[in-house]
Image (spheres, rainbow, N blue to C red):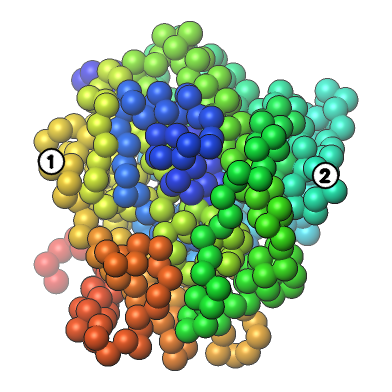
Amino acid sequence: MAKQPNILWICTDRQRFDTLGCCGNRWVTTPHLDRLAQQGVVFDQAWSQCSICAPSRASFLTGRYPSTTRVNRNGQTIPASERLISRLLANNRYICGLAGKYHLSAGAPEVTQWSEKRIDDGYVVFDWSLHPPATPVCNYTAWLSEHGVEFKRTPVNGSEYVTFGMPPETSNLGWVAQRAINFIKCNAELDRPWMFSCNIEAPHNPYDPPREFLEPYLKRLDEIPLPAYTPGELDNKPVFQHIDRAGVWGGGNGYFAAEKMRPEDHRLIRAGYWALVDHIDYQVGRMLAALKQTGQLENTIVVFMSDHGEMMGDHGIYFQGAYFYEPMHHIPFIMSWPGGMRGGRRVPAMVEMVDLAPTLLQATGLEIHPGMQGRSLWPILSGTADASQHRDDVFAEYYQAIPSGYRTSPNHRAHATCVRSRDHMLAVYHGEDIGELYDLKKDPGEVRNLWDDPAYVAVKTAMLKRLCERMGETIDPLPPCVAPY
């Protein structure tokens, strides 16, 4: 058997598709990721399964939908019976490591002792951090203490939304990248393949990029475009969006309330977000350089993706929640393997992040776990399947995924499911009298809700049938049948 490839799996947090130069953003400076895209394969239609961290991460690490993994909310613990791809790889000689965010169980300080609870995940290196510096003790804060470095942020022009953060070399992002580089170098001479999960908690808020990445945007702040929002567009949309416009995370609490922001606030937040993306690119460049310097680049699969997107003021909302707009679920997704697949390609097919785990197993020559529900992308990557055909639609779920959010009345449970085709998006809010339907050809910005439009009854019926079919597909294939009766 040919030598199995290494895997460098870089996952960011709350990064939208439209945040890279290779994805059409003319503001950001992302030369390393743009080069990775040129040399690898870009999936232009990649979609996450949930807009909240823990359900999304449990889903793509197992190849199973949130309702199947039973991780539907932040603060839950993934059941011990779930099999992460890291465990499956470790069972087949891979050395697996992780740095940064994990978030498959509660990470809040009141229940977390040094590191969040783990199942048998296969990671032998586990450098954990979450929401620095909020968690009192984690590997990153311990490292800062070891080096006598004080964690601090400095407000930008008195803003309550954006700060200058730590320098690149002592930032959480820089620390995570260095853990990955150390792992890459230490494993260069071993005769076993490795997989490293580099879990970057950016461009998630707080928006605290290093000064050198933010200052170029501050010089052009007045030119930065405002969020895409049409006044009155939420009038016939679900109540959850109205709540979040007045304060994020289902609270209506005034925190990042888009309705109260000035134009300069919106622009500065976008600048801070993009500056964090530029910082991500810089640190990705360091990791790719380490692969090249150690002679491992040719035989390493590099994955770059995010767990989900971010509203950034579009549709009058910040952060994330019980909605399925394109900025919330459409994410960047790049794969590269110089020695194993042809690069320089863009894949137009619709794909889900639940497809990634089976893809990596097939790429490494391993059997796909019988519990996985995703569809391997390896036939497309290997050139044996049509790159324009994979899925007819994509599916997403939200089941009160922010535990403390949307508690304004017994009916506001925020249980919702969504199906999106190339032509239409439909979202059902279970227990509510209103849903969402958009004609993506006529209204790609998803402004006009057609849920009650009599001209779209046939479309709505067809999309509801699609949604029922996709919900049926989430039925757990485990345990496997072992006999005919």
The residue shown at (55%, 73%) is 231
Q: Classify 465 as above or below 26.
A: below
Side of 359 relative to 100 (left or right): left
Image quadrant in which the C terminus is located: bottom left
Q: Position of residue 18 (x, y in %)?
A: 45, 45
x%, y% of residue 270? 62, 48
Residue that numbered label 2 is attached to: 157
Label whose residue precedes the other's in the sequence (1 or 2): 2
Q: Residue at x 40, y 63 (%)?
A: 445
Point 78% across, 59% down: residue: 110
**Whether residue 375 is visible:** yes
Viewer-side residue, 255 vs 302:
255
Of residues 39 and 237, which is closer to you in this image? 237
Question: Where 67 falls versus 334 (above or below)?
Answer: below
Does the CB distance between marks 1 and 2 fall below 8 Å? no
**Residue 348 horizontal side relative to residue 314, left or right:** left
Quadrant location, the N terminus? top left
Pointer 1 local density, CA inside 10 Å: few below 14, some 14–19, many at least 20: few
Looking at the picture, which amino acid does disc 1 mark? Ala
Q: Residue furthest front?
A: 222
Q: Is residue 95 above or below residue 185?
A: below
- Amino acid found under the numbered disc labelled 2: Asn
Counting other residues with Cα less than 10 Å from the Cα at mark 2, is it few (<14), some (14-19), or many (20 or more)?
few
Name the one closer to the observer, 42 or 157: 157
Q: Is residue 259 left or right of residue 384?
A: right
Residue 421 in view of the camera: no
Residue that label 1 marks = 385
* Label 1, label 2: how far apart the Cα atoms are: 53 Å
- State the image coordinates of residue 173 (x, y, percent, origin top left): 65, 33
